[in-house]
């Protein structure tokens, strides 16, 4: 049985955009993400060979369709990893945070905030 690709609903939208030529591979790739998964724009940039601006355009399109939602994560300037906490809005980010991995205290976390997305399920069934 084919697993349900929740991103299939954006396929018709992609046909009207610059993603038209790549829409099949984009939908295929996004289909690997399931409910609750985190989507890192850098992964799409790497795997789909899209420039980072296009990646965000694509993900915003999916967000507008209610398939994914935006979150923020803090990138540790010391160990170059995400610190392990997720925030829904900029206002939720504390003034200082500690990296879960190297325990560095990050005093200006807003400067290291990166937008990521999470697959959500708002389908009415
Ligand atoms: Zn760190």
Image (cartoon, rainbow, N blue to C red):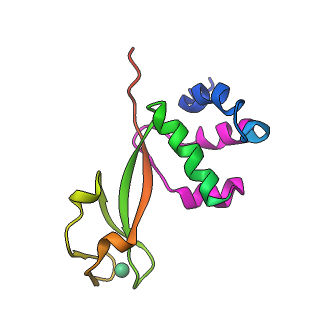
In the rendered view, does 95 fall on the left or right side of 81? left
The answer to which quarter of the image holds residue 45 is bottom right
- In the rendered structure, the answer to whether residue 35 lies left or right of residue 42 reads left
Name the spot of residue 4 as percent of width and height, x first.
56, 26
Q: Is residue 53 magenta?
A: no
Q: Quadrant of residue 114?
A: bottom left
Question: Residue at the location (64% across, 29% down)?
Answer: 13
Q: Is residue 102 above or below residue 30?
A: below
- Picture coordinates of residue 77, whole percent (x, y): 40, 81
The magenta segment: 23-50
Percent x, y of residue 85:
29, 62
Q: Residue at x 58, y 42 (%)?
A: 32
Q: Nearer the viewer, residue 118 or 16?
A: 16
Percent from the top left, x then y, of residue 20?
Answer: 75, 36
Q: Residue at x 45, y 78 (%)?
A: 80
- Ligand 1 shown in quarter: bottom left
* Snapshot quadrant of residue 94: bottom left
Kindly give the residue lying farthest to the top in the view shown: 125
């Amino acid at each position: 049985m084919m697993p349900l690709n929740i991103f299939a609903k954006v396929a018709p939208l992609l046909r009207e955009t610059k993603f038209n030529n790549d829409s099949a591979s984009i939908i295929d790739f996004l289909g690997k993400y399931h409910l609750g998964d985190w989507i890192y724009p850098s992964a799409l940039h790497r795997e789909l060979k899209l420039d980072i601006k296009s990646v965000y355009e694509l993900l915003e399109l999916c967000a507008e369709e209610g398939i994914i939602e935006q979150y923020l994560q803090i990138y540790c300037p010391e160990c170059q990893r995400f610190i392990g906490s997720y925030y829904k809005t900029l206002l939720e980010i504390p003034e200082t945070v500690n990296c879960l991995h190297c325990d560095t205290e990050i005093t200006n976390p807003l400067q290291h905030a990166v937008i990521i997305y999470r697959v959500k399920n708002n389908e009415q069934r």
